[in-house]
Amino acid sequence: KNQVEQSPQSLIILEGKNCTLQCNYTVSPFSNLRWYKQDTGRGPVSLTIMTFSENTKSNGRYTATLDADTKQSSLHITASQLSDSASYICVVTYTGGFKTIFGAGTRLFVKA
Amino acid sequence: NAGVTQTPKFQVLKTGQSMTLQCAQDMNHEYMSWYRQDPGMGLRLIHYSVGAGITDQGEVPNGYNVSRSTTEDFPLRLLSAAPSQTSVYFCASKYRQSSYNSPLHFGNGTRLTVT
């Protein structure tokens, strides 16, 4: 069964600390994996995309990794800020790009 | 350039009522789609369109209708609202369905409550 699972469900960290969010998937054939950030009351916004041949990609304080062999991805946030408080959603596209599965998201709370 | 615009932002309906959720994009995207977001679950695809005049069902289409008469607009109609349709609805678009490395652009959602 094609699935995308994210962990943890929620996370509380202090401002300035680092954190890592996990995404495991079981889809085939894989096309790409994208991380979205969803602020409260807003729609998701793309942070980064990982294709099969990419292992690591950074976007400012966000660094995504992909291990296509184990079908795992992570999103590492460095020096967290209050504005990082949001849900982070892992989305996997497969079957030549015509199908997409959304993970349930990780809710991150950054406290001062 | 407003991106994807959804209206209304909030709506309360009684069981059995009908309504239309509006979605418009100004990016000349061919692909548009509707999702619902429920607590503890990933976004689920309701209906999608690959161009004006062409629509298709997604994962959870029952109880919803769509049409695409123009490239810009993709309204979602609830035919007879049920409490199970209480959810947050998102409209999203991208240039083409086949541009699978392009991100979806989302609206800010409509929070619907059916009593």
Image: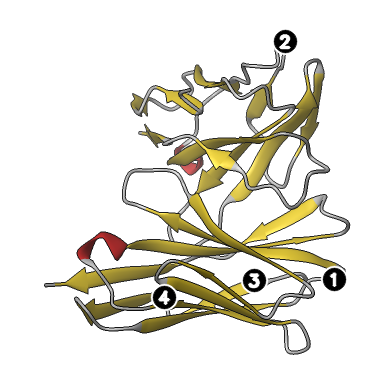
| First-in-chain label (4 vs 1) | 4
Direction bottom: furthest residue:
A70
- Classify residue B53 by image quadrant: top right
Identify the element where label 3 is drawn: strand
Identify the element where label 1 is drawn: loop
Q: Which mark is residue A28?
A: 1
Q: Amino acid at mark 3?
A: Val
- Report which residue position mark 2 lands on: B69
Q: Which residue lies at the image location 55% right of the left edge and 75% below the top edge?
A: A64
- Report which residue position mark 4 lands on: A9
Identify the element where label 4 is drawn: loop
Q: Position of residue A68 (x, y in %)?
A: 76, 82
Relative to B58, B21 lies left or right: left
- Report which residue position mark 3 lands on: A4
Q: Nearer the viewer, residue A56 or B2?
A: A56
Q: Neighbour class for label 1 at 10 Å: few (<14), some, many (≥20)?
A: few
Q: Amino acid at mark 1?
A: Ser
CA distance separating discs 4 and 3: 13 Å
- Above or below B81: residue A21: below
Snapshot colouring: secondary structure
Q: Neighbour class for label 3 at 10 Å: few (<14), some, many (≥20)?
A: many
| First-in-chain label (3 vs 1) | 3
Q: Position of residue A77 (x, y in %)?
A: 39, 76
Q: Is disc 4 in contact with disc 1, using a CB cutoff of under 8 Å?
A: no
